[in-house]
Amino acid sequence: MSKKKLIIFPLVFALLTGCGASAPVDDGGASATAEASVEVAQDVSSTEASEGKYDMRDITPKDLVAEMTTGWNLGNTFDSWGGSGLSDETYWGNPKTTKEMIDAVHDKGFNSIRIPVTWYDHMGEAPEYTVDEAWMDRVEEVVNYALDDGMYVIINSHHEEEWRIPDNAHIDSVDEQVKVLWVQIAERFEKYGDHLIFEGLNEPRVKGGQDEWNGGTQEVRDCVNRLNQTFIDAVRSTGGNNEKRLVLITTVADSPVKPAINGLTIPDDEHMAVTIHAYTPYDFTFKSDNSYDKWDGSHKADIDYMFADLRNKFISKGIPVLMTEYGAVNKDGNEDEVCNWVTYYLTKAKELCIPCFWWDNGQFNAGNEFFGIFNRNTLSWEREKVADAIVEVYK
């Protein structure tokens, strides 16, 4: 999601006016300039985008995040596990990722992509924990698909809960493994510019533990804070572009509830932001015992309060937030209702300059985990109304 240097400033103006800033009615042609710059950005050739993917600007996290608009997750792909070697990529039913898939997502209007990665199945024994080179190569190949389109890219460590247990009984060994893993990832990607972002922990928690999804215990919160710091230290220790790379820390389980966000320790780092997951309201976005499928506005306060908490805790203090997972399942054809919901949700996020990444796991139809909107087999939008509603907020 790279922007070329010649057009960064007018493009940032255009994006910032979409993040709550107000442009004057008589702008002397600035709006037309911004619109023209966006068109130029969209016409940048893949060759030029590729050349810019190694640029590391001295840019603040706030300004970098403001350049991001709407995002998409390549879910149930590199975060899949249980197979063998490179077959993990397709083990959960999605096809092998191609450049054409990423191009289609980009061409739809998404300028950011998150590539969740599970590393544990591809790591050697202690103390080296050496990541399999073929797995690292394949992840880098797909990262380049997106960077060559000028997209912003997030890579993380996903589905690591079986070993990454944040409690006092495990923290010392877990801390060392987190450090060694992220040193290897950071060293591999050190040459890449500021359009590549590292997300240290995905939904860190004790599985089945007390308040697993609601902030955990003080012990768990302390351990997650320690792992956030270890992740940052590991990345910074590799030097080069990683000294200024945007890194993302998170709460217990990526939760936005007050015990989780209030329990998050903010490291002393100049290139850091916070990541949150919010499928809000849960009874609308998932199927549950109290499930409902109509979005009539009666539950919008759930979204309002959640974003207000994030604003008060982080954004008001100059700490950007990224919503790296959100989404709503299709409940037997309620796509118009989902469109109404996503328009409200993203409009509130946009006011705070919070880019949001739809969780697309490649699964469709009606079910509790069917968040797919893009059919990777046919390169078509299975839930096109929803995809259109997402990108329309940012036009």
Image (cartoon, helix red, strand yellow):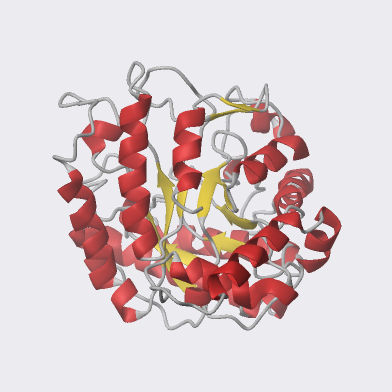
Q: Residue furthest right?
A: 47
231 displayed left or right of 147: left
Q: Residue at x 78, y 61 (%)?
A: 49
Q: Is residue 280 above or below residue 239?
A: above
The answer to whether any part of residue 391 appears in the image is yes
How many marks the image carries: the answer is: 0
Left/right of residue 336 with respect to residue 67 in the rendered view: left
Residue 343 left/right relative to 47:
left
Viewer-proximal residue among 55 and 213: 55
Return the x and y of residue 362 as percentages of the image width and height.
54, 28
Residue shown at 39%/73% (left/top)?
21
Q: Nearer the viewer, residue 302 or 54?
A: 302
Q: Is residue 245 above or below residue 145?
A: below
Which residue corresponds to the image point at 48% horizontal and 54% vertical from the top-left? Answer: 394
Q: Which quarter of the image is occupied by the N terminus?
A: bottom right
Q: Estimate the x, y position of residue 14 in percent, counting from the top left.
A: 53, 68
Q: Residue at x 71, y 42 (%)?
A: 103
Residue 324: give x, y in percent of width and height: 45, 52
Q: Is residue 206 visible?
A: no
Q: Position of residue 83 (x, y in %)?
A: 64, 27
Q: Name the side, left or right, on which 201 lies relative to 182.
A: left
